[in-house]
């Protein structure tokens, strides 16, 4: 049994040692839980600095901004090689390098969204070209498998493939690989395509087509390589028939056939609706074409050997006439819209993010769409002053970038509080842009000591007060608070409130304390604590109120007609007593009436009063130092005695000068003479009496 006990003791000791080595270091360097800073909304991104990037076109995304104007490109057709560009801002046309050969019925254009426009020559030819927007040059590409004629059409679906209808009363449908420069046959359309045949790409997996010279309307699944019929056009489409998509739920169409008819197809409802007629009658025929500008407007060629060019406002359902084309457009007329090109690069520098404390940074992650030739990469800057920013990559230098989402952040940023990221967007093809959807950075706070401020006490009474403080910095986690207080400045503070609360930076707090001494000065300070330790605020002080003079001890006794003797017992905590008097009523406050007494004694004779007059007295207690007064007071009245007897009236001299007289000196001679005379007279009287007796 003893052996078992010894083994258990050894195991327990081993566990305790491990616990000490594992948990003791944690107590000295507290760390908070992992936190993630995420930016994903338009407001998030726009709170930073934007340079050649766009956050408004697609709210919540960051893309490269566009530069320059929007342009519409056009084939004249009509058996010519003429090729023009229309500036939508200036409403002007300009000539560009002509196509390598003449363009006729079946001529078509398709913009790839970047720097290139692809073209069919039509006119029962196999011509297939590519136009460079930036170079203004044409390049001949691999010819189509078979000749293209009226109803020929072209569309770019994504950045990898171009799709084509052969037309010419044929059902051939082909796909051109941009990467390999080769054509391949796809499943043919359900019936032969004739004049008025057209294609449009609505985004996603589907291409839509008009059959021409009929009401046929179909949908092609790119992934399924299959066609399906959709709701037929309202009436038969003829030469000049055309399609364009808004990239969303609607497709716009010309009927052609020398009419003014213009329709809109609802993809989700699979239904057609008539829209406002085109401006001229008779109207659209061979060479009619449409192009959507992706901002609510459709541009249109009338064809029909005319030079009319129009603009349709989707929101207003109305047409407006624009500048005429340089020459009349006929069969083979075609349009392609190219929006302004993207900048080659741009960046987003985020707003400053405050982690709240020194932090250890984890990783940076983001979500982005990066078409071929585009990229998104990042650098990070941190500091502790929120003003000095040096952006660095994963090796701590400005020459490198974070290029993989989820990458660990360079450890040299640890222990800093403020952070920014800079996202650099790049494209080698100014027709496409990378798209940044969100950015996230993980970090954990290093918990530091809090800081706290002590504020003035309020509601100070005889034995109670309310103490106040503010948590100026929580150190990275919620803090508890308390107050400690006593009667000695600088401590020790023998009294304290309980630890309580869960405060964060900027929050104020207060505690009511009781049981204080009356008329006593107290010193106090606020304290806050978190897992890193306890911090104290600066010391403040307050003085409690004294009690009024003891009830029943304030007396006023008339001494005579001009004096009243006052006496009292000082209230608890009082150092001085103030007594004020009035005639006709008590003083209303400490500034009313006449000040009789303000000192540390307990009695006083009020003299110089008027006889037979009632005086009203009030007495307050005071503590010096902070001039704290008692809330209460005592009051008493007393009436002086009657008027005292009049004093003797001194002699009045009439004229001359009055000198002081020594009465004894003046009367002495007279008293001597009287004494001599009395002795003489007495002798005479005695002698006469003797004579009579003898007789």
Image: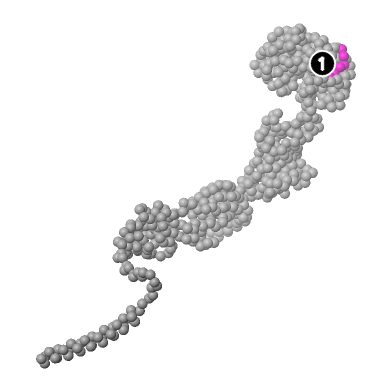
Where 137 sits versus 450, above or below? above
Relative to 568, residue 418 above or below = above
Q: Residue at x 63, y 43 (%)?
A: 35
Q: Is residue 486 left or right of residue 152?
A: left
Residue 89 to residue 640: above or below? above
Does any portion of residue 534 appear in the rendered image? no
Q: Residues within 10 Å of mark 1 (few under 14, many from 20)?
A: many
**Residue 390 image offset from top left, x and y in percent:** 74, 46
Quadrant containing the C terminus in the rendered view: bottom left
Question: Which secondary structure, mark 1?
Answer: loop
Give 350 or 188, whichever is nearer the viewer.
Answer: 350
In front here: 132 or 164? 132
Q: Nearer the viewer, residue 339 or 221?
A: 339
Q: Which residue is mark 1?
A: 325
Give the magenta range: 79-84
**What's the magenta bit mostly, secondary-structure-wise?**
loop
Q: Please report the residue visible at 74 percent of the width from the left and 33 percent of the height from the top.
A: 53
What residue is at 78 percent from the left and 44 percent from the top?
398
């Amino acid at each position: 049994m003893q052996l078992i006990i010894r083994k258990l003791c050894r195991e327990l000791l081993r566990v305790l040692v491990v616990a000490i080595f594992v948990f003791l270091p944690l107590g000295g360097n507290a760390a908070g839980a992992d936190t993630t800073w995420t930016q994903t909304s338009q407001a998030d991104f726009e709170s930073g600095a934007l340079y050649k990037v766009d956050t408004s076109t697609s709210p919540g995304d960051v893309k490269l901004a566009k530069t320059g104007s929007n342009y519409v490109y056009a084939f004249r057709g009509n058996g010519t090689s003429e090729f023009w560009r229309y500036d939508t801002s200036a409403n002007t046309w300009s000539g560009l390098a002509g196509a390598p050969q003449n363009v006729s019925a079946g001529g078509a254009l398709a913009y790839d969204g970047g720097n290139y426009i692809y073209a069919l020559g039509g006119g029962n030819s196999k011509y297939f070209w590519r136009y460079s927007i930036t170079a203004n040059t044409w390049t001949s590409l691999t010819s189509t498998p078979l000749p293209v004629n009226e109803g020929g059409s072209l569309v770019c679906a994504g950045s990898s493939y171009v799709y084509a209808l052969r037309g010419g009363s044929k059902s051939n449908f082909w796909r051109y690989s941009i990467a390999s420069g080769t054509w391949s046959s796809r499943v043919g359309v359900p019936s032969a395509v004739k004049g008025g045949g057209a294609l449009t790409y609505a985004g996603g997996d589907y291409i839509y087509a008009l059959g021409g010279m009929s009401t046929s309307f179909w949908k092609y699944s790119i992934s399924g390589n299959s066609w399906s019929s959709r709701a037929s056009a309202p009436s038969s489409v003829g030469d000049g028939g055309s399609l364009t998509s808004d990239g969303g739920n609607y497709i716009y169409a010309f009927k052609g056939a020398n009419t003014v008819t213009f329709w809109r197809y609802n993809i989700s409802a699979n239904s057609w609706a008539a829209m406002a007629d085109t401006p001229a009658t008779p109207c659209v025929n061979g060479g009619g074409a449409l192009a959507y500008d992706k901002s609510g407007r459709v541009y249109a060629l009338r064809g029909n050997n005319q030079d009319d060019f129009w603009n349709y406002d989707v929101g207003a359902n109305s047409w407006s006439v624009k500048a005429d084309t340089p020459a009349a457009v006929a069969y083979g007329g075609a349009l392609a819209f190219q929006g302004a090109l993207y900048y080659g690069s741009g960046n987003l520098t985020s707003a400053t993010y405050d982690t709240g404390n020194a932090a250890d940074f984890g990783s940076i992650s983001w979500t982005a769409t990066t078409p071929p030739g585009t990229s998104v990469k990042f650098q990070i800057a941190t500091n502790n002053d929120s003003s000095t920013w040096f952006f660095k990559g994963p090796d701590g230098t400005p020459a490198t970038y974070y290029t993989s989402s989820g990458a660990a952040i360079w450890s040299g940023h640890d222990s800093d509080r403020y952070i920014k990221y800079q996202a650099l967007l790049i494209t080698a093809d100014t027709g496409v842009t990378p798209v940044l959807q969100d950015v996230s950075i993980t970090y954990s706070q290093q918990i530091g000591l809090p800081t706290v401020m002590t504020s003035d006490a309020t509601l100070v009474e005889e034995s109670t007060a309310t103490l106040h403080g503010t948590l100026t910095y929580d150190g990275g986690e919620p803090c508890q608070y308390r107050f400690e207080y006593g009667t000695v400045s600088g401590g020790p503070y023998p009294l304290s409130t309980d630890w309580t609360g869960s405060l964060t930076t900027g929050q104020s707090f207060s505690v009511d304390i009781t049981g204080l001494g009356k008329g006593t000065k107290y010193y106090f300070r606020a304290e806050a604590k978190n897992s890193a330790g306890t911090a104290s605020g600066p010391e403040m002080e307050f003085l409690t109120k004294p009690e009024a003079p003891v009830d029943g001890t304030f007396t006023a006794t008339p001494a005579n007609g001009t004096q009243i003797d006052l006496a009292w017992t000082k209230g608890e905590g009082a150092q001085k007593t103030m007594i004020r008097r009035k005639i006709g009523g008590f003083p209303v406050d400490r500034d009313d009436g006449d000040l009789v007494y303000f000192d540390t004694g307990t009695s006083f004779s009020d003299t110089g009063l008027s006889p037979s007059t009632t005086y009203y007295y009030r007495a307050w207690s005071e503590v010096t130092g902070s001039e704290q007064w008692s809330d209460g007071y005592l009051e008493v009245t007393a009436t002086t005695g009657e008027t005292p007897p009049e004093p003797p009236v001194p002699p009045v001299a009439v004229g001359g000068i009055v000198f002081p007289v020594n009465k004894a000196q003046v009367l002495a001679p007279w008293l001597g003479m009287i004494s001599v005379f009395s002795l003489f007279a007495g002798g005479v009287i005695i002698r006469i009496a003797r004579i009579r007796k003898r007789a």
